Each structure stands twice: as structure tokens, then as C-alpha cells.
Amino acid sequence: MGRLSLAVDVPPVTLANVAAVDAALLADAKVTLQPGVHYFHCDWSLDELISLYLADSAPDEFSLQHGDVWLEIHGARGTLHMNRLSRADYVFRAALAQGASLGAGAASALDIDETFDVGDALLSVVRDGLVISMDAEHVQGVA
């Protein structure tokens, strides 16, 4: 986690940048995410415990809850953000982080949840400032 908080964010791609890409190219496009973004699947609610420690309010005792948790952890310049994701969103974003195309990431997410909204998922990852480049038109974030 310390390594994540030392990462430096790069200017992200904007919604306007994405809107300018030919829709026919989007399925094959690959994105690059911020260098401090990582995805983790846990069998326990470790994010709750970590959040307590980061807030300097760790209790004397803590009961971990068993259950699947899909986490997106984004660290940059001394900050650390953890977001719980749905399994489908996790699969989509983790696939993008591993170099899959938008189409392949969407297909993986749709295998998990047939109601997964690919458009909303793409807008969300861009709105969150996580996408720093798209290879469809060599779209780069603006400084």
C-alpha cells in the first residue's frame, strides 16, 4: 500500500476525448490506467479494517466478515482511495488494467452479469480520472 501512495497521477483522458473517438474503434481500443491503480479480490472485508487504520481509528478488536469483496485501490502522492466494486465492474476494470481491449473487458463483465451496462462502466472509469490514454486514436490526457 505504501508503494501505491507514492505513485504520481498522470493527466486523465476526458469524456470529450472519448466522445471524439470513432465508435467503430471503441471495442478494439485499449486503455492505460493511472499507474497507482490496482485491483484486488478478497475473501474477507479487509477494506473495512484498512480504512479504520488509515483513519487512525482502529478498534482494539475487529471482526472480519467473510465474503467476496472486489476492490479498486488508487494511490497517488500520499493518498490512498479504496472503492468496493460490483463483481462485473471489477472484472471489467481489472481486464482493462491487464491490457484487454474495451470489447474484451466488456465481454468478460457481461459473462458475470448480463445486465452490465458497458457504456456506464466506460463513462465511470473515465469520470473517475483513471484512464490516461486510449490507443484507438492515441488519445492522451491533457495537462
Image: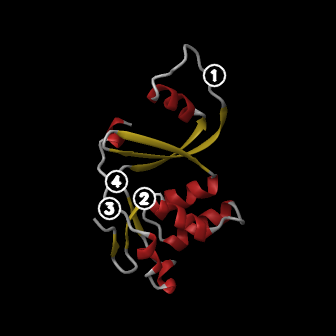
Three-letter code, disc 1:
Ser
User: Which of the two discs, 3 and 4, labels the residue nearer the N terminus?
Assistant: 3
Q: Is residue 140 left or right of residue 129?
A: left
Q: Position of residue 133 (x, y in %)?
A: 36, 68
Q: Which residue is mark 2?
A: 130
The residue under the point 54% across, 70% down is 104
The residue under the point 40% across, 79% down is 136
Considering depth in this image, is 43 or 9 the residue closer to the camera?
9
Three-letter code, disc 2:
Leu
The residue under the point 59% across, 71% down is 119
Q: Which residue is mark 1?
A: 63
Element assignment for label 3: loop
Q: Mark 3 to mark 4: distance in Å?
A: 11 Å
Q: Mark 2 to mark 4: distance in Å?
A: 9 Å
Element assignment for label 2: loop
Element assignment for label 1: loop
Q: Position of residue 2 (x, y in %)?
A: 34, 35
User: Which of the two discs, 2 and 3, labels the residue nearer the N terminus?
Assistant: 3
User: Which of the two discs, 1 and 3, labels the residue nearer the N terminus?
Assistant: 3
